[in-house]
Structures are given as C-alpha cells and as structure tokens.
Amino acid sequence: MTLLSDPLKIARKELDSYWMPFTANRQFKSAPRLVVAAEGMHYTTADGRRILDGFAGLWCCNAGHCRKPIVEAIQKQAATMDYAPAFQMGHPLAFELANRIVELAPGKLDHVFFCNSGSEAVDTALKIALAWHRVRGEGARMRLIGRERGYHGVGFGGISVGGIPANRKMFGTMLAGVDHLPHTHVLSNAYSRGQPEQGAHLADELERLVALHDASTIAAVIVEPLAGSTGVLIPPKGYLQRLREITKKHGILLIFDEVITAFGRLGANFAADVYGVEPDMITFAKGITSGTVPMGGVIVSSDIYQAFMAGPQGIELFHGYTYSAHPLACAAGIATLQLYKDEDLFARARRMAPVLENALHSLKGTRHVVDIRNHGLVGAVELAPRAGAPGARGFEAYLRCYERNVLVRSTGDILAIAPALIVEESHIAQIVSTMREVLGVLD
C-alpha cells in the first residue's frame, strides 16, 4: 500500500479496521466500491473505470474535482504555514476569507465564525442563538425549533433539531426543550417543477408551537431552505417568507442551514438570495472549499455580533475549535470562491438548471417512479418502495447506476442528483439515461 491512493491495492482483510460512516459496512466490504482518483466530473475506480459523478462528491465538490487553482493554493499554503492557533491568535487568510464570504452574504449578515463541518456549524449556530438571548437579558429563551425530516448534521444539537428518525432513535433523549415543525412534502405537489404551489400554510404551525410554549421561551427556528439529505424537499412558494414573518413577530431567530445550498447550488450565492428571505444566521460548509479541505462556518447578522461586543472586555463567546479557520482550509476557500467568480459558475448553474429539470422530468411514467422534484442543480426521483422493504429498491438502483459508471445518491427510495456546477448537457443526459435503463430492469 502506498501513501497516496494510486495505485492502491487493498486486500479484503485490510478493509475491516475502518468503521465507515452512514454505510452498510458488511455489504460494502463484501463488494467494495473504491475510488482512487478524481478529475473534473469523474472519479476513477480501483479497477480503472471512469465514474461520472452525478452528486458532486457528497453535495460538496461544486467546482468539480481536483481543480488546479484550488490544488495549487493548498499546496502553496502547506509549504508556507501548516497551522496557526485559532485562540487569541490569527492569520491573514482567515480575515481575507471572512471578508470574501461577507461580500457574498445577503443583507445584514456580516460576520463569520469558522468551524470544520456542517455538523459543527449547526451546533455553533444553536449555541450562538442561545447565548445571544442570554446576553440581551432574555435567558429564558432556551427552546429550539427544528423540522420533521430535517437534517442538520450529527452533533447532539443537530440531531436534536433534526427530524430524520434513523439519525435519532439510538441516541437517547438528546437536547431538552426541542420541538419540530411539520415537513413540507405535500403529496398533491407531486411532479412539481421548481417551487411547489401548495404548502405555505405549513409555516403557520409555528404559531401553534408559539402558543404552546410561549414565545418568551423560544430562541430559534432552524430549517434547511431546501431540504437535501431527506430526499430533496423544495420549499413551497411563500413558505419561507411566512416563517420569517412569524419569527420576527415573536423575536425568534431564524437560522438557514445552507450547508448544501450555499455557493451556487441553486444558481446564486445562497438559497436566501433565491427565495428572497434574509435569516439571522446562515450555516455553510461543503461548497466553500469545493470539498477539498474540511471547513464550515456560521454567518451572523451585525445585530447578533454587536450584542456580544457590548459586554465587558475579554472572551465574548466561549466556543471554538482547534482547527477553526485552518490555514489550508482558508487557502482552499479563497481559491474556490475566486474560481467560482472567474468561471461565473453560479450563473452557469442557473443556465443548466432547466436542462436538468427537463431531463429529470422525462422520467415521469418510468417504471417505479412516483414523484420527481427539482430546483437549481438539485433533483430527486422518488420510487415506490418494495412491500416490507423500504429503501431496498432505492439502494439497489444506486448500486446498478454505479455498475453502469454513474454515481447518484440513494436516500431511502429516493435517488438524488446534484452534479458539480461545471456539468455539461452530455453529463446530464448520461445520468438520466442510466437511471432510465436501471429502472427499466429493476424489480
């Protein structure tokens, strides 16, 4: 075995030590799917096949794989300064990247707190929300509101406000004082193109929770503007606007979890821009470095930041991570944002979105398909589950697409698509034709 991934030969017994995340370990290790290289829109497998990446790695490689400007920035930084302490010290790249992010952020969101992943970003945002109310003298606001079918990472805060049962059921009572809004998947909206027409009224459920708990106890509401990991649930028209109205009315912070949607996925800087709603905080990760180096963060409004700065001199927020604003991650982030700008990739995503929409919706009427959803460069094809075996048909479809050299993602019986922003029409055609072929032979 070499230190790098080429050419890597791994014996079956060498697979056992690694406990893989969110993976059917026994199934994988009986028939491994190993990739050893990547470039542009493709992976290369250990047996030499080129796999078209229809999912941007894991929602994250928005600029495509191994882009030269990003790789060179990381290499240069690694040779210049490998690490700098994040507590009581800083380095110039952290401030440069924060300023670049603030230039892209909507409205009054003008301060960035860095971490290393979407999970850390969510827990950071929740802690900031609780602490903000406390420094303002409203310490009774300790309750957090999430949403059914929401995914907010795997920290205890994230799974508490999250609403995917399998992610929660083994881990006890989690955080106290958490409640959930209903999800927005309305069956009558099947086969919607873009934002569905029906469902804005579901935001009014927040008024019911306010009446139940009293607004004086509620700190924040957190939602994904577009829910990704649960199977691509698009917000109904007017829904996010109504959530914003209700939270403002009751003095509740609104957090948008944009770990998936930030940096071009919907054809704009943030989903907040696309949907015309300015939250109080935005979490981000994934696309900030195009997946090259782990990084995440929270963008907060000036009102939130200044409330902490109004207190006595000293540490204002007792929170942070050893690797907050890691130099390599900052170098990668700066190079990534510059690449997005130089190649106008967010506008490119807007131009390609109708191509993806039309291709995906051509699968309507295909065997097993019960719904198709899309917005920006995100899409989902929902399959009817097998009797007594939910998720089995979706996972088998994922495996069969991989065998045909196309990578999609299965989440339950939903096949999700989220290609890099450099995707071509030919790539979309290959992804959709492969799905059609697989579904045609799938039991």
Image (cartoon, rainbow, N blue to C red):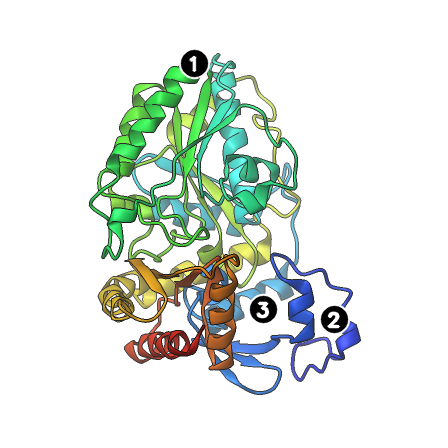
Crowd rating for badge 1 (residues with CA inside 10 Å; few <14, some 14–19, many 20+)? some
409 above or below 128?
below
Question: Where on the picture, by quarter, is residue 342?
Answer: bottom left
Q: Residues within 10 Å of mark 2 (few under 14, many from 20)?
A: some
Of residues 292 and 213, the one nearer the viewer is 213
- Residue linked to disc 3: 75
Q: Secondary structure at mark 2?
A: helix
Judged from this view, the residue extending furthest toward the left is: 197
Which mark, residue 15?
A: 2
Q: Amino acid at mark 2?
A: Leu
On the image, the x and y values in percent for residue 388 come to 52, 57
- Residue 20 picture location, percent across and down: 67, 61
- Horizontal relation, residue 358 to residue 136: left or right: left
Q: Earlier in the sequence, mark 3 or mark 2?
A: 2
Q: Is residue 280 visible?
A: yes
Q: Provide the residue designation for mark 1.
A: 216
**Numbered disc in front, either 1 or 3:** 1
Q: Residue 199 got which mark? A: none
Q: CA distance from mark 3 to mark 2?
A: 29 Å
